Image: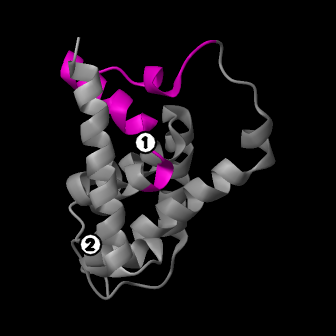
Amino acid sequence: MCEPQDTFEAVVTRHGPMVYGIALARTHSPQDADDVYQDVFFLYYRRRKGFADDQHRKAWLIRTALNRSKKLLASAWCRHRAPAGDAQPQDACTFALPEENALYAALTALPQDERTVLYLFYFAGCTTCEIAAALGIGEGAARMRLSRARKRLHRQMEGEMTP
């Protein structure tokens, strides 16, 4: 069950960046990622059942963020909205260093499944076993997806760096 020190605020502080990152990796839009983030933590707040441990809570938050992102992207509102001017998805976020902007642009150019496994592995610190469980795929498939994503990202980054 939930530990007494696991207040709602503590959970949001600890897992909020991970949930937002998953949502941003899936939706390409900071505004949509905000919506998913709020939705996930609203559902978490309303949830009456406790969690066995923090790993169980983290897995639930990952799965819920993935599901809510998928639901948002499948919604009629999202499918029928007009693009915001000439803005490209990678223009939605800007970072201090040019290398970070190049990495973000390369990441957003990847297919959604590949962005997701890279984010979960490198930023959320999930193992391939946890990624497989969160995505509902086999562990071998998660490792293969991660390997393909790394190779594709590497090729894209090489293309960015060559004059």
Q: Position of residue 61 (x, y in %)?
A: 41, 67
Say whether residue 138 is left or right of residue 35.
left
Tell me where the magenta segment starts and ends, as one range.
86-113
Image quadrant holding the C terminus, namely: top left
Q: Nearer the viewer, mark 1 or mark 2?
A: 1
- Residue displayed at 46% across by 69% down: 63
Bin the neighbour count of mark 2 within 10 Å (Cα to Cα): few under 14, some 14-19, many 20 and up.
many
Secondary structure of the residue carrying tag 1 is: loop
Residue type, label 1: Leu
Position of residue 35 in the picture relative to residue 6 (left or right): right
Vertical side of 127 occupied by 69: above or below = above
Query: Which sits in the foreground, 49 or 67?
Result: 67
Q: Which amino acid, by three-letter code, is at mark 2?
A: Thr
Mark seen at residue 110: 1
Q: Considering the numbered disc 2 on the image, is that residue within a helix, a strand or a loop?
A: helix
Name the residue rendered at 40%, 84% in the picture: 50
Give the residue at mark 2: 128
Q: Position of residue 151 (x, y in %)?
A: 27, 48
State whether the magenta stretch is mostly helix, strand or loop: helix
Quadrant for the N terminus in the image: bottom left
Q: Is residue 28 above or below residue 56?
A: above
Q: Is residue 58 visible?
A: no
